[in-house]
Structures are given as C-alpha cells and as structure tokens.
Image (spheres, grey):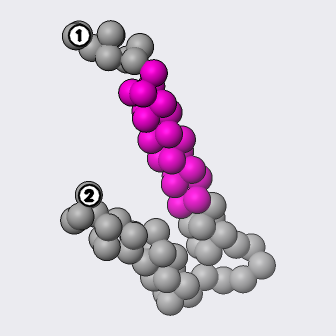
Amino acid sequence: MNFWELLRHPRLSRLLGVRWSGQATDGLFQSALASFVLFSPERQADALSAAVAFAVVLLPYSLVGPFV
C-alpha cells in the first residue's frame, strides 16, 4: 500500500480526524486559558496565576507523555 491508499482507509481517516480535532481543541483551550489568565482586563495577572495556568496546560503532557 502506498500513502494515498492508506489515507483512503476508513479506520485511518477516522483516527486522523479524531487526533486532529483533539489537537485543535487542546490549542483552543490553551489559548483561551492564557488569554483569560494573562490578558484579563478585569484583574491583573500575578505570577502565581500564570504558573498555575502553565501547570494546567503542561502537567498532563508530563504525566501521560512517558507512557504513550
């Protein structure tokens, strides 16, 4: 099988679709969290809230990443 035949396979296209949509929603969550914590006009961001936001974003990759 070549690359294009593999892309037409229903299971692979479903897997890629789920993977891409998951990555897109992860990116949306990260940008929303950063804009809410760091660029909120109602309150000034301090170092602790920025550190918590980065921990929320990066901790799952640090915990699950070695096992995947």
Please determine whether, in this image, residue 68 is positioned above or below residue 8: below
Q: Residue 12 carries which label?
A: none
- x 27%, y 14%: residue: 3
Q: Is residue 19 magenta?
A: yes
- Where is residue 38 shown, x and y percent of the image? 59, 73
The dominant secondary structure in magenta is: helix
- x 51%, y 47%: residue: 22
- Where is residue 37 shown, x and y percent of the image? 62, 74
**Residue type at the position of mark 1:** Asn
Q: Does the magenta stretch include residue 52?
A: no
Quadrant position of residue 62: bottom left
Secondary element under disc 2, as helix, strand or loop, is loop
User: How many numbered markers are drawn?
Assistant: 2
Quadrant of the snapshot with the C terminus: bottom left
Quadrant position of residue 10: top left
Whether residue 39 can be seen here: no
State if disc 1 and disc 2 touch (CB < 8 Å).
no
| Closer to the camera in the image, 26 or 19 | 19
Q: In this view, does 7 lie to the left or right of 32?
A: left
Spatial CA span between label 2 and label 1: 26 Å
**Residue type at the position of mark 2:** Val
- Where is residue 6 shown, x and y percent of the image? 32, 17
- x 55%, y 85%: residue: 49
Please determine whether, in this image, residue 24 is positioned above or below residue 16: below
Residue extent of the magenta highlight = 10-31
Q: Which mark is residue 68?
A: 2
Q: Name the residue under label 1.
A: 2
Secondary element under disc 1, as helix, strand or loop, is loop
Whether residue 2 can be seen here: yes
- x 50%, y 89%: residue: 48
Quadrant of the snapshot with the N terminus: top left
| Closer to the camera in the image, 52 or 17 | 17
